[in-house]
Image (cartoon, coloured by chain):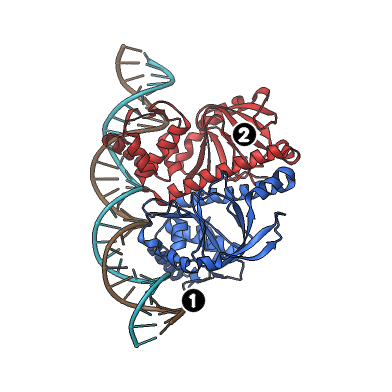
Chain colours: A blue, B red, C cyan, D brown
Amino acid sequence: MHTQTAAIAPRQTFRTDAASVGTISRRPVEDSAADPLGVEGVRMTYARNEEIFGEGEPSTCVYRVLKGVVRTYRILSDGRRQVAEFYLPGDIFGLEAGDMHRTSAEAVSTCEVTAIRRHHLVERAISDCGAGHKLWSLTLHHLRRSEEHMLVLGRKNACERVAWFLMDMAERIPAHDRLELPMSRQDIADFLGLTIETISRTMTQLQDDGLITLPSCRQVVFRDRRTLEDMAA
Amino acid sequence: MHTQTAAIAPRQTFRTDAASVGTISRRPVEDSAADPLGVEGVRMTYARNEEIFGEGEPSTCVYRVLKGVVRTYRILSDGRRQVAEFYLPGDIFGLEAGDMHRTSAEAVSTCEVTAIRRHHLVERAISDCGAGHKLWSLTLHHLRRSEEHMLVLGRKNACERVAWFLMDMAERIPAHDRLELPMSRQDIADFLGLTIETISRTMTQLQDDGLITLPSCRQVVFRDRRTLEDMAA
DNA sequence: CGTCTCATTGACACCCTTCAAACGAAGTGG
DNA sequence: CCACTTCGTTTGAAGGGTGTCAATGAGACG
């Protein structure tokens, strides 16, 4: 199944810990789950770092996150990785133009998803225009986010990227001036087109500047949202 | 109309030359033009660097390129610009999730487009599921390209970016081992997240390495496609 | 308490940017 | 036909931001 992931750089070794639990967690948890798209799906659980689908695999399902966080990404032959998006509970991922996945998807944390057969969705989109329109809107929304991401990757410096990331996550995981990061520094780095060291240095600098405090490496407390938002803009 | 483009860096001054011809060229050329999306549109011409729509404006139309090239982009308050995509004849642009444009669009060269009323398209998508499905596919295709672009911006060096760009353009503008670039170095730089100087230096280096020749700054002749494709991958 | 993984911090290198100047092509006017 | 201007491109020199390499620190777990 892993056609493209033959020669991966040493960094990706963390992925191996999923193999040990893969066969167990990949079984469906419940037979059916009602979905907001109006198509029945199958509930699945994935362990941390377990692959949900891989680049080059046939695109049979579309997924909706129930619990946990999922990342989609692409990798170059030498192991450089670009995380395209993080998907939080309620988010839908795995929609593809063709019948092959162009990105890979993995569980950032232990997570539950509903898997919806792609052809069920397409059939419904063809018969029910309302559902089709909803899917289109969803894709347009993804495209808009993707274009924003391109602006960040192409034109913003490390500080602005991190500030943007924190503001974006804070918006998606609402909590009063406090943010629990669901992903590692490496994930953030690969999302922002930086290295883990730069993420770390930038975070501590934001702390030194009095914009945030870091009770632990996964927790961020906002102390000056206004300035952060200005940096992120 | 230009709500967001108040304080732009000096670099954007080239845009002013469109103003002189804007009122003339903006008139419809023909009343109606059959479109592959099955909705009638109005043919328009735009001068080089003329704005087709701006960030923040209401999204009333979707466009199809007939002649010339269009760029869509976003800019930061200090003038940094990220070109999201170049649209060639046959391409469709201007589709938005909401009723407001999140990017701006300008004519790279003098160009003709068909403008299709957005609500006509949406109405048709709602009544004709086939058309709706086509629009969805189109958006998914854009999303796929956008994710590839993110990988380039986030993880590739200057050489790889330029090689990728040249290979991509060569694929979209087919001609035997020869490519006529429709856009300036500045456009390429802003598309690839680099500076104009880096683009120039990289191009001459590719020439020195025997991979391309540059008869003029807009013309590229491919001498070693294999190596270029390896760099681009 | 030892091990493992991930995060932080430091020193240094390098790729790309910045600033500056020269170059070339196209257009204009004498 | 030739100066002159203008705009875009090329080239050079120097600096800075981020990457690389390496060591240390901090939790989690057995």
The count of marks equals 2
Q: Nearer the viewer, residue B218 or A231?
A: B218
Q: How far apart are marks 1 and 2 (CA)?
A: 50 Å
Q: Nearer the viewer, residue B70 or C18?
A: B70
Q: Is any atom of residue B192 visible in this view? A: yes
Dividing the picture into quadrants, the one containing residue D19 is bottom left
Judge whether D7 appears above or below A165 on screen: above
Element at badge 1?
loop
Query: Which residue is farthest right?
Result: B127
To which residue does mark 1 refer? A215
Circle 1 Cα neighbour tier, 10 Å, few/some/many (<14 / 14–19 / ≥20): few
Circle 2 Cα neighbour tier, 10 Å, few/some/many (<14 / 14–19 / ≥20): many
> Which three-letter amino acid code belongs to the residue tagged 1?
Pro
> Which three-letter amino acid code belongs to the residue tagged 2?
Tyr
Q: Which mark is residue B63?
A: 2
Dividing the picture into quadrants, the one containing residue B212 is top left
Q: Residue B92, how many percent across, how many down? A: 59, 35
